[in-house]
Image: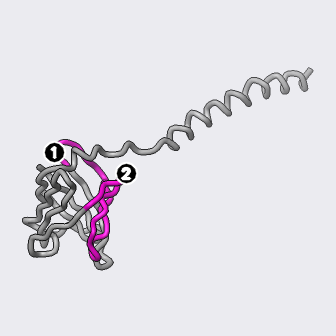
Amino acid sequence: MQRNFLSINLRLWLPMAALILCTLFIPSCVEDPKPKKENILGLWKIDRALRNGKLTNSLDGLYMYFEKDFTFESNLLGDTSSFSSIVEGNKIKIDHNLIRHFDIQELNDSLLKLETEINEDELLFVLKR
């Protein structure tokens, strides 16, 4: 009698356990939504910047401007410069030997968070319209 009770319980609990595990793990496999390219267009001004995880004010006055053809203009390297760029998924690839790409961390109508690495420094830019 004990054996029948155990086998009945296993038949009930095993599928339930599998269902619970699936509901926990399947949503974590879904890709992050890709930002809309159109939302990147326009003028963005620095709100704050972090260099290697520490707040820095050496980038005060920084701006980034993305035109309709995705020409990227910025004063990031000192003087104002323009480069061609391509948006692919969550990356903005820049045609420059020092700035290779930005990882888009967050993007909405008024906020843009970008991460990149320049000269072995990890940089996080928080930009606003």
In magenta segment, residue 7: no
Q: Is mark 2 on a helix, strand or loop?
A: loop
What residue does disc 2 label?
89
Amino acid, disc 2 = Gly
Residue nearest the viewer, comparing 11 with 30: 30
Residue 41 in the image: state x and y as whole percent. Answer: 18, 49
- Number of the label disc, if any, that sits on residue 101: none
Q: Which of marks 1 and 2 is nearer the N terminus?
A: 2
Residue at 16% over, 70% down: 76
What residue does disc 1 label?
110
Residue nearest the viewer, comparing 108 with 23: 108
Task: Locate the N terminus and report the quarter of the image it occupies.
Answer: top right
When the figure is inspected, residue 102 is found, relative to residue 52, above or below; the finding is above
Residue at 55% over, 38% down: 26
Magenta range is 85-111
Contact check, label 1 and label 2, Cβ < 8 Å: no
Residue 113 in the image: state x and y as whole percent. Answer: 24, 55
Amino acid, disc 1 = Ser
Residue farthest to the left, as pictured: 61
Image quarter of residue 3: top right
> In the figure, is residue 13 to the left or right of 106?
right
